[in-house]
C-alpha cells in the first residue's frame, strides 16, 4: 500500500501542502477549525504521524528585502548577517543570503537553495510573509514583528525613550524626530518611545517637529529636504532624534555645511551605533544595538523552535553619549 503523503491530505482538504504541514506539526498561524480539519483528514486517510519527526536543519536562507540593500541600511544588516553566520558556522549549517525584490520569484529562489529554514531580516510586505508561511518551513523574523511569527527585535521603544530622555536632560526644549515609514515595526516603536518620553516629561508634542524622510533609498536628498523644513520653522528645533544613524549622520552633515555648530545649535542622537557613528566629527550619540546578537538569536530560535505558539524575544539597547549631544 502506498504511504499517505502531505499532498494527499492537501488534495482531500483543499488546503496547501504548507498549511497541512503546519497543522500536523501544531504550529501557529491558523484556526483550530483548520487544524482539526487536517488532523481528521490525516487520520481517515491513514497518514503515518511518525513522519513528522523533525529533520535536522542543514541550510538556512537569510532573506533581506532589496530596500534594505542600500548604503543607508547595509551597516546595520551586514552585522546582523555576520551574527547569523557565526551561529551557523558553530552548528555546521550552510547560510545563504537572498536579496528579495517585490517582483522577484521568491518561492522559486527558496526551492533553488534547498532551504530547511528561513530567517527574514527587516521589513517584508504581509503578502510576502504569508506566501513564505505557506511553505511550512521553520521561520523567524529579525528586526520585525508580526502576529503569528516568532520574532527577534531590539528594544526599539525603550531606545527611542532613552534617546529623547537624554536630550531632555541636557535642557533641550524643542526636540524633533526624523522617521522613516511608520509601516516598519522598528521605526514605529522608536517613534512611540520618543512620544512617551515627551509625555512623561510633560512636554507638549509639536506635530511640526515630527518629519518622515521622503525616501528610503540611497542618497541624502530626502534627509536634506526634511532638515530644510525643520530649520525653516518659526521656532526651529534645538535637538534632533533620528530613527537610525545613517539619517543622523546625513542630518549632521547638512547642518555643518550651513555653518551650524553641533551640539550648541542642534544636539543630535541617532539609533543603531553603526561603525560610522563613533568616527563622525563630532562623534554621534546613539542607541547601541547588538546587531550580531540579533542574527545569532535568530538562528538559535530556528534551531530550538518547538511546535506551538510563536515567541517574541527582545534584545536590550544602551544609550551611548558622545559629543553630538553633550556640550561641556
Image: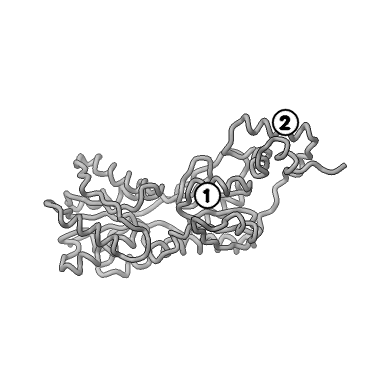
**How many numbered marks does the figure carry?**
2
Q: Quadrant of the C terminus?
A: bottom left
Mark 2 is surrounded, within 10 Å at the Cα level, by few (under 14), some (14 to 19) or many (20 or more) other residues, namely some
Residue 271, labelled with which disc?
none
Q: Of 94 and 130, which appears nearest the observer?
A: 130
Q: Quick check: can you spot residue 320?
A: no
Would you place residue 31 above or below residue 261 in this image?
A: above
> Which residue is found at the position 49% from the left and 44% from the top?
312
Q: Nearer the viewer, residue 318 or 10?
A: 10
Measured as percent of width and height from the top left, residue 247 is found at 31, 60
Question: Where residue 128 is drawn, which disc sits there?
Answer: 1
Residue drawn at point x = 19 percent, y = 41 percent: 204
Q: Nearer the viewer, mark 2 or mark 1?
A: 1
Mark 2 lies on a secondary structure that is helix
Q: Residue furthest right?
A: 1
Q: Tell me, yes or no, if residue 216 can be seen here.
A: yes
Residue in front for this viewpoint, 162 or 229: 229
Q: Estimate the x, y position of residue 95 in percent, counting from the top left.
A: 59, 62
Amino acid at each position: 500500500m502506498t504511504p499517505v503523503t502531505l499532498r494527499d491530505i492537501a488534495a482531500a482538504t483543499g488546503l496547501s501542502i504548507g498549511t497541512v504541514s503546519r497543522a500536523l506539526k501544531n504550529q501557529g498561524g491558523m484556526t483550530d477549525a483548520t487544524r482539526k480539519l487536517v488532523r481528521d483528514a490525516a487520520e481517515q486517510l491513514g497518514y503515518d504521524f511518525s513522519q513528522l519527526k523533525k529533520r535536522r536543519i542543514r541550510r538556512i536562507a537569510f532573506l533581506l528585502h532589496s530596500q534594505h540593500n542600500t548604503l543607508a541600511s547595509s551597516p546595520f544588516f551586514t552585522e546582523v548577517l555576520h551574527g547569523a553566520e557565526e551561529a551557523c558556522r558553530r552548528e555546521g549549517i550552510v547560510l545563504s543570503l537572498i536579496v528579495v525584490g517585490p517582483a522577484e520569484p521568491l518561492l522559486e529562489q527558496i526551492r533553488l537553495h534547498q532551504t530547511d529554514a528561513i530567517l527574514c531580516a527587516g521589513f517584508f510586505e504581509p503578502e510576502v510573509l504569508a506566501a513564505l508561511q505557506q511553505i511550512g518551513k521553520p521561520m523567524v523574523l529579525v528586526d520585525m514583528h508580526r502576529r503569528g511569527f516568532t520574532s527577534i527585535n531590539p528594544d526599539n521603544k525603550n531606545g527611542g525613550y532613552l534617546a529623547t530622555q537624554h536630550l531632555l536632560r541636557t535642557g533641550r526644549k524643542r526636540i524633533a524626530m526624523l522617521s522613516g515609514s511608520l509601516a516598519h515595526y522598528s521605526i514605529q516603536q522608536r517613534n512611540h518611545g520618543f512620544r512617551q518620553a515627551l509625555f512623561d516629561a510633560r512636554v507638549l508634542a509639536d506635530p511640526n517637529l515630527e518629519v518622515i524622510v521622503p525616501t528610503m533609498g540611497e542618497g541624502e536628498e530626502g534627509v536634506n529636504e526634511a532638515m530644510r523644513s525643520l530649520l525653516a520653522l518659526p521656532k526651529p528645533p534645538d535637538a534632533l532624534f533620528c530613527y537610525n544613524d545613517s539619517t543622523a549622520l546625513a542630518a549632521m552633515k547638512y547642518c555643518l555645511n550651513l555653518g551650524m555648530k553641533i551640539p550648541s545649535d542642534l544636539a543630535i542622537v541617532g539609533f543603531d551605533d553603526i561603525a560610522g557613528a563613533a568616527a563622525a566629527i563630532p562623534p554621534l550619540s546613539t542607541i547601541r544595538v547588538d546587531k550580531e546578537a540579533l542574527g545569532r538569536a535568530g538562528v538559535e530560535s530556528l534551531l530550538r523552535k518547538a511546535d506551538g505558539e510563536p515567541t517574541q524575544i527582545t534584545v536590550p539597547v544602551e544609550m551611548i553619549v558622545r559629543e553630538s549631544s553633550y556640550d561641556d
